[in-house]
RNA sequence: GCUCCCGUAGCCCAACGGCAGAGGCAGGCGACUUAAACUCGCUUCAGUCUGGGUUCGAAUCCCAGCGGGAGCACCA
């Protein structure tokens, strides 16, 4: 309990009270409506700063605090640089958790979602990010998702959205299909269940048509996106170039194509392998003996029973079944036995390969397991012009000449020869290098009409159908007579039916199918009874273009205004977690390119610069309730205040690094803020004071920070800016207590600059300081002062003198000292003479005015 | 197995190829206090993971190794 006396002291001392400051400024800021972007007549240049919008799963947590904190630092920074900054916020509010909560607790998914949003908005308000709330959007609003449907129809018209049957990833827990990107190490990205396969007819977006552009345009992002994300996307798209080769099949009219990156090794092909779950395998086995049919059938069953997890384990033994059919090698007419084996995938290339066991590890493993022939056609011992050969050493370390090398024998070593070399046993290709042989073999195939250059991708088309309720209905009607009929644009949005009365529990088919009134419609084309498509869209569709919806979030006539896009987009600074490196970020890039092709956008990449924040950990591991190491966002806010929390997160280290909460000190941050704030109350000069009269030493620190802060902010070195602010506050304190005193102009200048820059991290404290310094709100809109360059150069500097790189003396010299003068001074130094001794001076490097290095010999 | 990133005081982190320290945490000493906490002041602490190389000069660039982290992993 505080006594009256203590309270009085409290007030007298003007103690820093973060709660009071927050309560004071929140309503005032809202009244001032500071962060609305794009006001009519605003002529400032524009910046678009965006943090990935949150899924409303409950309340905000420390991860949000970090991510939105960094986004807000960027937004505030650009405002201080004189930009009209668009910094919107919205809600990624469709998705499974709402539905699962509905099933578990009987809540309506919509009610659950919007209640969470209310809760999170209250937390955001306290956290005070500088959002333009007037553009708030919810992807679960019909006003939003109607444009998902509109985009879907546009893509359907272009053939980009299509339906096909196939084996798809199936999550047995969520009871829905998953896109390839949502399967992580064979597990469901969301719930962790082991993913299985299921044959279904589903909707896809043809991302593979954009694979080359998605890959090639990554070059534009080099340097502006974390290199990790760029390489992950490259990896994910996984382009390989080579050739399609036509193989005739005995007893089949048409030849079958095979994709290979190594057409140069055609002469080394000794068998062919087809994917057991491909149509081709089924067709080939149909013409085989009953015994083969039985063995193949058993094999196929065992393959289908495998989960992706089993398939993912490497070095598991190769399995397969000989189909008793033969292919003809187009280049030399050889008969190649055809096998079915699960190491060949049905949905990559053509689901069939030519096996060259001597030069492909997987083929070699298979050949060794089934005693199939191996023929070496590339001599990898032979050096190739233009390639520096690695010369192997024998056991005594003596380089071995080619004739001393052990014979190439993949069969006995078990190692396939995949390196550079010279072609042998390959007829017209003999003697060529690997790369020349690849080129020549493709030419030969083209001349004979047996093959052509080809590319393949690891990337698969994006499966967007979901068999769940809480998502965007797919705007297609299925009619017995007309087939797939798009819902007319004028009938959009196709609203979700009311959840009440629907059984949302996962059954493997969409709950929408049970909404009879909703499903049964008349065909827009022929008027006959028809049914709606009952699947909903992957929620990653919602987030693929939301950055455009912010530009006119309240426009009911269109998805977005291309003129606004011209003004604001693409996003200048995007902030979010690396977990979206290949999901959201790839899909969003794809949508942007589609919209470009449709003529709605003039750019092809959505996010010019990307910052990935790290994670907030506790004691070295991810925070979670079950581990008992959860740091609650709300309780941290209560204990230390918004500003201290934000400063702590910004100061902890580089933004992209993980932060361990055990290593940081919100108490320390609060102390720093209190020190800064106290100074603003002690400044004894008035705002019209003449800066030039101020203490030069303190002014130098102030202006050095003004000079450095922009490039530090733009390279995301927020932790360094905070450290430099601490330095400035410490120096100001010293100037007041032990220097020129609180009335000095430099003290006011330092305090004002502290407030201006502190606004990036601690907006409440900065605003209150700004008011105490005699100004009107808001400091958030004040352009940063320009550094006085004259103050940055010191008149006297300490020059260091090195002898052979070791510091031997320091000299106080004028900053304008000439090279000659400095060298003379250095040579005259007694310490230098001692260090040089009898040695001969061979070189003197002078970097006036800071450094001299004397190199000696002897 | 392949690829990428990172190793600086007890801890978190700074340092255009040029004096290893901006800052914080923790520790120590002191002031305030009857005392403690808070606050304030002062202060100790590493030669940059190891080994080579380039350079007048390397934490920084190059090579190899060790340690840690991440991504990819039958994609023909």
Image: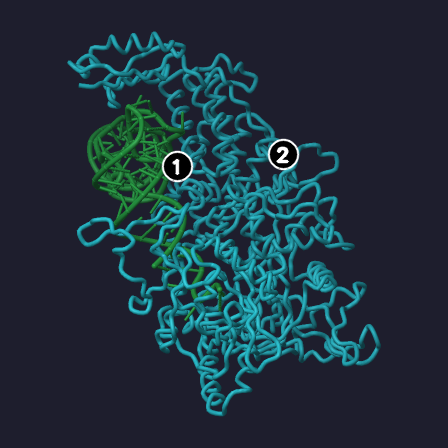
Chain colours: A cyan, B green
Q: Tell me residue A551's x, y (percent).
A: 69, 47
Q: Circle 2: is it few (<14), some (14-19), or many (20+) Cα within 10 Å?
A: many
* Circles 2 and 1: CB atoms closer than 8 Å: no
The residue lying at 54 percent from left, 61 percent from top is A243
Judge left or right: residue A451 versus residue A15. right
Label 2 vs label 1: CA separation? 32 Å
Across and down, in percent, residue A458 comes to: 52, 62
Image location (x, y in percent) of residue A746: 47, 18
Q: Is residue A685 visible?
A: yes
Indicate which disc residue A83 carries: 2
User: Going from the N terminus, do you reach mark 2 or mark 1 first?
Assistant: 2
Mark nearest the camera among 2 and 1 is: 2
Name the residue nearer the viewer: A427 or A570. A427
Name the secondary structure under disc 2. loop
The residue beneath circle 1 is A671
Task: Name the subunit of mark 2.
Answer: A
Q: Is residue A586 above or below residue A797?
A: below
Figure disc tally: 2
Q: Given the current orientation, which residue lies at the most extreme front position?
A: A427
- Residue at screen point 27% across, 11% down: A826
């Amino acid at each position: 309990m505080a006594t009256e006396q203590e309270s009085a002291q409290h007030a007298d001392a003007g103690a820093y009270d973060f709660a009071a400051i927050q309560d004071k400024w929140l309503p005032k800021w809202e009244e001032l409506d500071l962060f609305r972007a794009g006001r009519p007549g605003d002529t400032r240049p524009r910046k678009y700063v965006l943090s990935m919008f949150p899924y409303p799963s409950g309340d905000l947590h420390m991860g949000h605090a970090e991510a939105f904190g960094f986004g807000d630092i960027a937004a505030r920074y650009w405002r201080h640089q004189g930009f009209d900054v668009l910094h919107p916020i919205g809600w990624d509010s469709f998705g499974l958790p709402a539905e699962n909560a509905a099933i578990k607790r009987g809540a309506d998914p919509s009610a659950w979602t919007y209640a969470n949003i209310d809760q999170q908005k209250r937390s955001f308000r306290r956290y005070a990010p500088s959002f333009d709330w007037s553009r708030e959007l919810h992807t679960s609003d019909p006003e939003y998702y109607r444009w998902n449907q509109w985009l879907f129809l546009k893509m359907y018209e272009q053939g980009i959205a299509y339906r096909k049957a196939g084996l798809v990833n199936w999550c047995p827990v969520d009871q829905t299909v998953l896109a390839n990107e949502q399967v992580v190490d064979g597990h469901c990205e969301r719930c962790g269940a082991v993913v299985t396969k299921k044959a279904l007819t589903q909707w896809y977006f043809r991302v593979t048509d954009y694979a080359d552009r998605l890959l090639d345009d990554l070059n534009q992002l080099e340097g502006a996106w974390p290199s990790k994300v760029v390489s992950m996307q490259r990896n994910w798209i996984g382009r390989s170039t080579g050739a399609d080769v036509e193989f005739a099949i005995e007893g089949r009219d048409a030849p079958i194509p095979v994709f290979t990156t190594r057409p140069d090794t055609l002469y080394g092909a000794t068998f062919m392998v087809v994917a057991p779950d491909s149509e081709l395998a089924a067709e080939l086995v149909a013409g085989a003996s009953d015994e083969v049919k039985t063995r193949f059938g058993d094999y196929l069953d065992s393959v289908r029973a495998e989960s992706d997890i089993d398939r993912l384990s490497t070095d598991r033994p190769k399995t397969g079944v000989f189909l008793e059919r033969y292919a003809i090698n187009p280049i030399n007419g050889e008969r190649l036995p055809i096998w079915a084996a699960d190491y060949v995938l049905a949905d990559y290339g053509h689901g069939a390969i030519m096996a060259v066991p001597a030069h492909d590890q997987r083929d070699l493993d298979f050949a060794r397991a089934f005693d199939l022939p191996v023929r070496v056609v590339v001599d990898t011992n032979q050096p190739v012009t233009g390639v520096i050969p690695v010369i192997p050493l024998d056991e005594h370390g003596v380089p071995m000449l080619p004739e001393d090398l052990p014979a190439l024998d993949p069969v006995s070593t078990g190692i396939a020869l995949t390196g550079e070399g010279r072609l042998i046993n390959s007829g017209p290709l003999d003697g060529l290098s690997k790369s020349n042989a690849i080129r020549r073999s493709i030419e030969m195939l083209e001349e004979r009409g047996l093959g052509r250059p080809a590319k393949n991708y690891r990337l698969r088309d994006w499966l967007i159908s979901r068999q769940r309720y809480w998502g965007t209905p797919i705007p297609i009607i299925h009619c017995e007579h007309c087939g797939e009929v798009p819902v007319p644009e004028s009938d959009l949005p196709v609203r979700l039916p009311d959840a009440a009365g629907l059984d949302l529990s996962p059954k493997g088919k969409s709950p929408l199918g049970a909404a009879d009134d909703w499903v049964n419609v008349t065909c827009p084309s022929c008027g006959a009874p028809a049914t709606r498509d009952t699947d909903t869209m992957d929620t990653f569709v919602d987030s693929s273009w939301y950055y455009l919806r912010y530009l006119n979030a309240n426009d009911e006539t269109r998805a977005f205004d291309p003129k606004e896009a011209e003004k604001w987009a693409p996003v200048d600074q995007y902030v979010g977690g690396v977990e979206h490196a290949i999901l959201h970020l790839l899909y969003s890039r794809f949508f942007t390119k589609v919209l470009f092709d449709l003529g709605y956008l003039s750019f092809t990449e959505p996010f010019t610069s990307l910052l990935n924040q790290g994670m907030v950990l506790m004691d070295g591991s991810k925070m979670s309730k079950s581990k008992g190491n959860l740091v609650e966002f709300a309780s941290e806010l209560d204990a230390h205040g918004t500003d201290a929390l934000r400063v702590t997160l910004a100061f902890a280290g580089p933004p992209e690094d993980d932060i361990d909460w055990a290593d940081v000190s919100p108490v320390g941050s609060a102390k720093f803020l209190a020190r800064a704030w106290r100074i603003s109350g002690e400044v004894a000069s008035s705002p019209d004071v003449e800066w030039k009269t101020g203490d030069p030493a303190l002014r130098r620190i102030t202006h050095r920070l003004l000079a450095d802060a922009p490039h530090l902010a733009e390279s995301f070195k927020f932790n360094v800016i905070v450290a430099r602010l601490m330095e400035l506050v410490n120096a100001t304190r010293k100037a007041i207590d032990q220097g020129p005193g609180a009335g000095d102009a430099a003290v006011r200048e330092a305090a004002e600059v502290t407030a201006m820059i502190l606004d990036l991290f601690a907006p409440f404290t900065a605003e209150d300081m700004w008011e105490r310094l005699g100004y009107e709100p808001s400091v958030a809109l004040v352009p940063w002062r320009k550094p006085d360059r004259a103050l940055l150069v010191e008149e006297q500097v300490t020059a260091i003198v090195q002898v052979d790189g070791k510091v031997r003396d320091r000299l106080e010299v004028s900053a304008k000292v000439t090279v000659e003068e400095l060298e003379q001074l250095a040579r005259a130094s007694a310490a230098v003479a001692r260090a040089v001794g009898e040695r001969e001076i061979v070189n003197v490097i002078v970097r006036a005015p800071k450094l001299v290095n004397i190199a000696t010999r002897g």
